Image: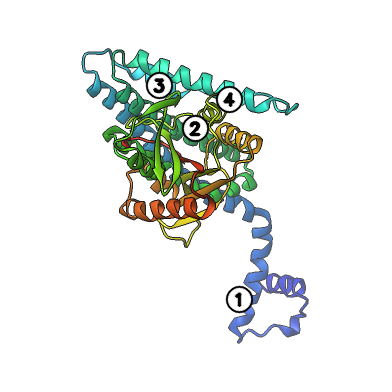
């Protein structure tokens, strides 16, 4: 025992005469020195075990949400078409579909390539839904498409997390595991939102992201609707001497329409001269901001992969049209689940803001295009 204490006293730079058996702090000091080599050798491995355990629990939650989304989708299809064959195999096949984006080494014409791939994917998905649910109405088909997209996204999140979990476990790389642990709360939050979104789509209820189409849809009430592009309609109206063109995806089906193609047709083929474009959309709020807050800005307020935004910006640049944006702030969960009261209550404030922009940025006799952006599930016109 004396040799043991002597060794660690020397390790700490102390002599044998410095050891005071009556001082309990001296024992703490020596024990601390004794544990340093242990943690140097095994500390990272212990940390990895702890992180693995935490990620494993989260992975079990993700798997449960993924499996529940799959079962809910199968049950909904069975309920919608009770006489059809068991759709489980076709739905499982659909959940594994993937999309390969075009090469971006040469950026020339890249947007057109992306548009082609995305349109092909959308059409393929519609065809598959028709195979799974033959004879279903367009409205029901759009609900099933949205449900399948949410279930597919959940499946992908689970598979990616499982991949990095197993890779970190196999390689015992604490760095891979710690990075996964840091983003796990965000992934779980997104997965929970997707899980709840499936129930909203099944009922055909408006989602938080639909506040833009809802505002424009009300402006369209009683007006003649015309097609501007596939699944996209517009109407003409008037406000204080200004000619208004109101554009949104065709509801109440769950679709975002093609506003980029629509504005190209209106400004190009139909030669309508717009003096301003106002886009209404939901926007991701920052932590600390309130759900339902309304803000005004400049630029094309539209999400997605970027094709629609590019088309709108191209038309605006070509014809020198200023683009104004009115947004309603909300979280990811708010955006894809049933519309919260705070978002619905922002309806009048959004309308007042749009009218204020029209009065401030245009004069009598000019024309304004107002676009209600996003998924128009449960929102008619």
**Quarter of the image with the C terminus in it:** top left
The disc placed on residue 115 is 4
Could you say which is closer to the camera, residue 84 or residue 277?
277
How many residues crowd mark 4 within 10 Å: few (<14), some (14–19), many (20+)?
some
Work out how far the residue at label 4 is from the one at label 2, CA to CA, in angstroms: 13 Å
Could you say which is closer to the camera, residue 39 or residue 101?
101
N-terminal label among 4 and 1: 1
Circles 4 and 2, Cβ within 8 Å, touching? The answer is no
- Secondary structure beneath dot 1 equals helix
Could you say which is closer to the camera, residue 45 or residue 364?
364
Query: Where is residue 309 drawn, in percent x and y?
Result: 57, 36
N-terminal label among 2 and 1: 1
How many residues crowd mark 1 within 10 Å: few (<14), some (14–19), many (20+)?
few
How many residues crowd mark 2 within 10 Å: few (<14), some (14–19), many (20+)?
many
Work out how far the residue at label 3 is from the one at label 1, CA to CA, in angstroms: 60 Å
| Residue corresponding to mark 3 | 92
Residue 200 figure quarter: top left
- Secondary structure beneath dot 3 equals helix
Q: Residue at x 35, y 38 (%)?
A: 220
Nearer the observer, disc 3 or disc 1?
3
Q: Is residue 330 at least partly visible in the picture?
A: no
Q: Residue at x 63, y 36 (%)?
A: 319
N-terminal label among 4 and 3: 3
How many residues crowd mark 3 within 10 Å: few (<14), some (14–19), many (20+)?
few
| Residue corresponding to mark 2 | 259
N-terminal label among 2 and 3: 3
Looking at the image, is 373 positioned above or below residue 329? above
């Amino acid at each position: 025992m004396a040799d043991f204490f002597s060794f660690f006293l020397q390790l700490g730079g102390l002599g044998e005469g410095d050891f005071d058996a009556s001082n309990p702090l001296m024992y703490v000091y020596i024990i601390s020195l004794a544990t340093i080599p242990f943690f140097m050798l095994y500390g990272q491995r212990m940390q990895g075990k702890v992180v693995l355990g935490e990620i494993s629990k989260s992975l079990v939650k993700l798997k449960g949400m993924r499996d529940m989304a799959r079962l809910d989708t199968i049950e909904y299809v069975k309920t919608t078409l009770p006489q059809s064959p068991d759709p489980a195999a076709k739905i499982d096949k659909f959940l594994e579909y993937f999309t390969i984006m075009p090469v971006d080494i040469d950026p020339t014409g890249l947007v057109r390539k992306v548009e082609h791939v995305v349109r092909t994917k959308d059409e393929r998905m519609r065809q598959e839904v028709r195979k799974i649910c033959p004879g279903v109405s367009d409205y029901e088909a759009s609900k099933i498409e949205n449900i399948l997209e949410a279930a597919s996204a959940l499946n992908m999140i689970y598979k990616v997390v499982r991949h990095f979990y197993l890779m970190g476990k196999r390689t015992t790389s604490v760095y891979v595991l710690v990075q996964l642990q840091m983003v796990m709360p965000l992934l779980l939050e997104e997965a929970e939102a997707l899980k709840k979104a499936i129930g909203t789509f099944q009922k055909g209820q408006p989602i938080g992201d639909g506040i833009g189409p809802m505002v424009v849809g009300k402006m369209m009430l009683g007006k003649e609707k015309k097609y501007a592009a596939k699944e996209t309609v517009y109407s003409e109206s008037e406000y204080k001497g200004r000619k208004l063109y109101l554009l949104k995806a065709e509801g109440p089906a769950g679709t975002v329409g093609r506003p980029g193609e629509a504005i190209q047709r209106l400004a190009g083929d139909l030669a309508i001269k717009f003096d301003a474009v106002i886009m209404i959309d939901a926007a991701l709020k920052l932590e600390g901001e309130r759900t339902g807050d309304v803000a005004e800005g400049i630029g094309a307020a539209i999400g997605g992969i970027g094709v629609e935004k590019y088309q709108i910006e191209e038309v605006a640049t070509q014809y020198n049209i200023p683009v104004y944006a009115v947004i309603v702030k909300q979280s990811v969960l708010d955006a894809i689940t049933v519309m919260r009261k705070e978002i619905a209550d922002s309806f009048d404030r959004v309308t007042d803001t749009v009218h204020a922009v029209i009065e401030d940025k245009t004069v009598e006799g000019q024309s304004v295009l107002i676009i209600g952006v996003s998924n128009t599930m449960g929102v008619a016109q």
